[in-house]
Amino acid sequence: NLEDGLYFGMAFVNSIGIDASRRQRLMRDESPRIRSTRVRCECTTDERGDVGDRAQTVPAVGVPMPPGPRPSWFRVQAPPAQASNASHARRYYDVEQSLHSRSLHTVCEEAACPNLGECWSSGTATIMLLGDTCTRGCRFCNVKTSSSPPPPDPSEPFNTAQAIAEWASINYVVLTSVDRDDMDDGGAQHFTSTVQLLKLARPDILVECLVSDFQGREESVRILANSGLDVYAHNVETVPRLQGHVRDRRANFDQSLHVLKLAKKHGQGAILTKTSLMLGLGETEKEIEDTLLLLREADVDVVTFGQYLRPTDHHLSVVRYVTPEEFDSWRRRGEELGFRYVASGPLVRSSYKAGEFFIANRIKELRLVR
């Protein structure tokens, strides 16, 4: 981990054009910045000519976390207590029982999501397809990785669609998966079959697919965008500058933006596109603003913001905890820029309350146009 940190630290120092003598001083063993593998650019300025909102920071593995205890806003009630009323509490228990009886695997439980109770009680769940082993190794993610994961279950689309169709308490489902670069189409046809079978059994249910970048393959995006899904979601994860430090080397911002544009193009106005950003990895306010502008230029409809939280000591450390007030400010800014819906908060995740009334109503409007 230290070697990786030194490599990325050196890459960052080189990228900002520091002269050779200063670079050598920065890379000496006695430098506390290199021991922590966090490099700060003291000379970075924004176009106003002053030091930017924060010195640019590169996240790294094994560096100290923010000092002190985790902020109080990360304390949440146990899942059933998150239900807003007795009816929602009953729905939560119904969803829980249905999941376990049908042997469906959800990201909600696998990732121990703090919003599990809130989503389940409102009738939203996120189902995993294509196994539990990813072909990529992003530095924020705790999913198992392998270059040759087990082949997908060919009966999974039918079994998943059948199980969800019988699940009366669910009205909005998110289908997601690990990256499957080992498959020719990245798993696009597997997703498409699941969506089509589900829609055949339950035409009323709303379906969001949160998928990989399919390595930028247009045909994979086209197949899925025309599957009958309602929301095409793909996460850019972080601002452009931090892509190489946060995501697997096979992923990048331009490719992700290209995929979102393709989804909008092939969806022909009948679907919503959605993405998500993690905050707290060293991004600056200007970088977030610029990223939002790029997403709007790509006609992305929905964006979510959440706090990055380190899953284990072997993953990227949190650079800072973003306050609820800042998250609310980004929600307002996203709305000002024209996003159809913005979810923003420390505990918000990309599938957070995906069936929010606004999205559900917008999808129903789009259905009338089809």
Image (cartoon, helix red, strand yellow):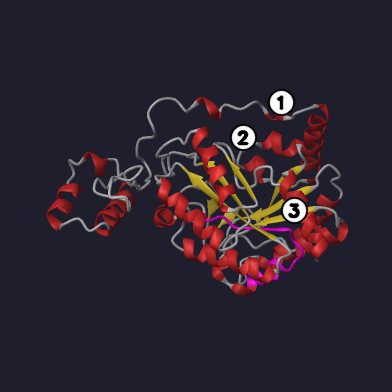
Report if residue 134 is visible in the image: yes
Name of the residue lying farthest toward the bottom: 219
What whole-number distance in Å separates the C-alpha atoms at marks 2 and 3?
Answer: 27 Å
* Viewer-nearest residue: 45 or 152: 45
Q: Earlier in the sequence, mark 2 or mark 3?
A: 2
Report the magenta residues as a range.
Answer: 220-236
Residue type at mark 3 is: Arg
Q: Residue at x 29, y 51 (%)?
A: 9
Q: Which residue is found at the position 70% from the left and 29% from the top?
A: 82
Q: Quadrant of residue 107?
A: top right
Counting residues from the N terminus, which is met first, the one under dot 1 or under dot 2? 1
Residue receiving disc 3: 362
Q: Return the residue at label 1.
A: 81
Separation of residues labelled 1 and 2 (CA atoms): 12 Å
Q: Give the vertical position of 12 relative to 79 (above or below).
A: below
Provide the secondary structure element on which disc 1 rests: helix
